[in-house]
Amino acid sequence: MFSTLKTIWQGLTQKGKVFPHQLAFTLLIPLRNLALSPHQVVERLHLLPQHRVLEMGCGAGYFSPALAQAVPQGELVLADIQPEMLAYAQKRLAKRRIRNTRYYLCQGTPFDFPDRSFDRIVLITVLGEIADPAAYLQEFHRLLHPDGIVSISETAGDPDKLTRAQLTALMQAHQFVLCQSYGTEKNYTLNFQAA
């Protein structure tokens, strides 16, 4: 039991640790709206009804209902490395009768999707947790439609948070260009397109 508690605590407080699925319910606290609301995420993505969206690191699915509802003729693919998180998100969306979704368990790269599968790829407080961001960014190039957007949001309090400068440099190093910027240094969203 002590070992489990230690793992959970490390997941909450240490850089590079994955958020513990045992605390998935805490990701649904409405106070998150103060930093970044589902409505803000949808607004910043400039979604069309037919878009296909990949939500990387969906966690408990806090942003997922709003994303799925914004693409009623499209599809939202929720992806996570923890099957427990995917199950939690799936139950949450099923309760709301949201059906234009699929679920994908990430087990490293390459991802099991055809080239140019997505109009938008969304990461919210996730990129800093990824052990090999270069491999993921390479995959995003392959998965993204030519006019698609990779949207990355970071919020205050995340031990893995990247600054705007760090994120911009990382994305530029992997042939992405900044096309839109929202928020402040504390809580921000940067949208990128393939160069």
Image: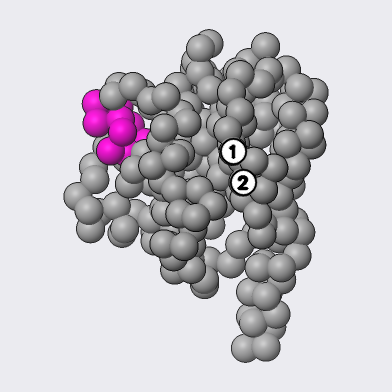
Image location (x, y in percent) of residue 112: 51, 32
* Up/down of 136 relative to 17, above or below: above
Q: Start and end of the magenta stretch? A: 68-77
* Amino acid residing under circle 2: Asn
Image location (x, y in percent) of residue 110: 61, 32
Left/right placement of residue 25 relative to residue 125 reads left
Crowd tier of the residue under label 2, counting other residues whose Cα lies within 10 Å: few below 14, some 14–19, many 20 or above: some
Left/right placement of residue 16 relative to residue 37 reads right
Q: Which mark is residue 187?
A: 2
Q: Nearer the viewer, residue 159 or 23?
A: 159
Left/right placement of residue 164 relative to residue 187 reads right
Check contact, mark 2 vs mark 1: CB within 8 A. yes
Image location (x, y in percent) of residue 156: 65, 54
Disc 2 versus disc 1: distance between alpha carbons? 6 Å
Is the N terminus in the top left, top right, bottom left or bottom right quadrant?
A: bottom right
Q: Which residue occupies 67% across, 11% down?
A: 195
Which residue lies most toward the left here?
A: 97
Total residue callouts: 2
The quadrant holding residue 51 is top left
Which residue lies most toward the bottom here?
A: 1
Q: Based on the picture, tell me whether residue 69 belongs to the magenta stretch.
A: yes
* Up/down of 107 relative to 148, above or below: below
Q: Which mark is residue 183?
A: 1
Image location (x, y in percent) of residue 183: 59, 38
Q: Which residue occupies 78% across, 34% down?
A: 165
Q: Is residue 18 visible?
A: yes
* Up/down of 52 relative to 127, above or below: above
* Amino acid residing under circle 1: Gly
Q: Which residue occupies 80% across, 28% down?
A: 169
Disc 1, SS: strand
